[in-house]
Image (cartoon, rainbow, N blue to C red):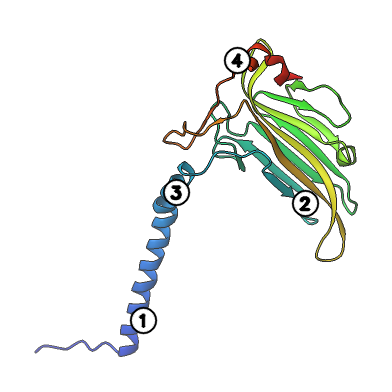
């Protein structure tokens, strides 16, 4: 004698929903592990070179009270995409004091970095972390040069940033200090036709006058 297995319609719907959910979950997992990184890498390779006067505005959350910003070639928060630049070539750590608009900024070199603190007149190489108070930046920005090429203490290739501050009024009507990180200069320039398969650009060649007077890049 044969018995027929009768499955209720509600159970059919249940299995169908479970199957669809499993398929969607598998698709999301594959996208995150395989397709997403491949698409991101492709977009990175097609990204334009860095541009002078590009600005990053930085606000520190009152609850977290700290932020870490890395500058490097491809895998950092700020991607320079220039040959000779390391990953995390420079790290900025900003920490807010509790209940007041006072901050501590630490400049951490991960590669060759030249730095001019606020109020200073000379830019020098730094070998370890340098810390300043945010009030020092008011009206006196800091200059940071991320160096890709150097010979006999002369800077031949670098990307220069300026770190400044200003006060703004947020959506709650509170006065907040905002940090402004500006890409001021790419020396001696970007070779627009040099992008490789990874999306990395070469620096321009030094012109004859710059080769004769490279000290201008290091003052």
| Of 78 and 20, the residue lying toward us | 78
Circle 2 residue: 60
Q: Which residue is mark 1?
A: 14
Left or right of residue 90, residue 171 in this image: right
Badge 1, how many Cα within 10 Å: few under 14, some, many 20+? few
Q: Nearer the viewer, mark 4 or mark 1?
A: 4
Q: Which residue is mark 4?
A: 208
- Give coordinates of residue 147: x percent, y percent: 65, 24
Comes first in the chain, label 4 or label 1 = 1
- What SS does tag 4 mark? helix
- Looking at the image, which is closer to me, 110 or 12? 110
Q: Are marks 4 and 1 in contact (CB under 8 Å)?
A: no
Quadrant containing the C terminus is top right
Q: Nearer the viewer, mark 2 or mark 4?
A: 4
Q: Residue at x 44, y 48 (%)?
A: 37
**In the rendered image, which quarter is residue 17 located in?**
bottom left
Q: Tell me which corner region of the image, top left, top right, bottom left or bottom right, holds residue 93.
A: top right
Residue 203: horizontal and vertical position, in percent?
Answer: 55, 27
Alpha carbon distance from label 3 to label 4: 43 Å
Report the residue marked by disc 3. Answer: 37
**Residue projecting furthest to the left:** 1
Q: Position of residue 16 (x, y in %)?
A: 33, 78
Q: Is residue 193 above or below residue 123?
A: below
Sooner in the amino-acid sequence: mark 2 or mark 4? 2
Tell me if residue 209 comes above or below residue 50 in the rendering.
Answer: above
**Of discs 3 and 4, which sits in the foreground?**
4
For the residue carrying disc 4, how many other residues have a C-alpha within 10 Å: few (<14), some (14-19), or many (20+)? few
């Amino acid at each position: 004698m044969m018995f027929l297995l009768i499955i209720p319609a509600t159970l059919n719907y249940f299995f169908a929903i479970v199957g669809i959910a499993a398929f969607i979950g598998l698709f999301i997992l594959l996208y995150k592990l395989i397709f997403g990184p491949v698409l991101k890498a492709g977009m990175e390779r097609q990204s334009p070179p860095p541009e002078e006067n590009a600005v990053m505005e930085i606000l520190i959350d009152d609850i977290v009270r700290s932020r870490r910003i890395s500058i490097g070639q491809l895998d950092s928060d700020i991607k320079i995409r220039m040959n000779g630049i390391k990953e995390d070539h420079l790290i900025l750590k900003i920490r807010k004091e509790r209940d007041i608009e006072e901050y501590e900024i630490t400049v951490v070199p991960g590669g060759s970095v030249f730095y001019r603190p606020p109020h200073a007149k000379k830019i020098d190489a730094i070998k370890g972390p340098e810390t300043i108070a945010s009030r020092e930046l008011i009206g006196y920005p800091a200059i940071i040069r991320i160096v890709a090429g150097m010979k006999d203490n002369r800077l031949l290739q670098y990307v220069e940033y300026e770190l400044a501050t200003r006060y703004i009024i947020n959506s709650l009507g509170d006065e907040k200090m905002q940090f402004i990180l500006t890409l001021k200069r790419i020396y001696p320039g970007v070779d627009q036709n040099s992008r490789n398969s990874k999306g990395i650009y070469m620096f321009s060649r030094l012109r004859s006058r710059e080769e004769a007077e490279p000290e201008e890049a290091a003052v």
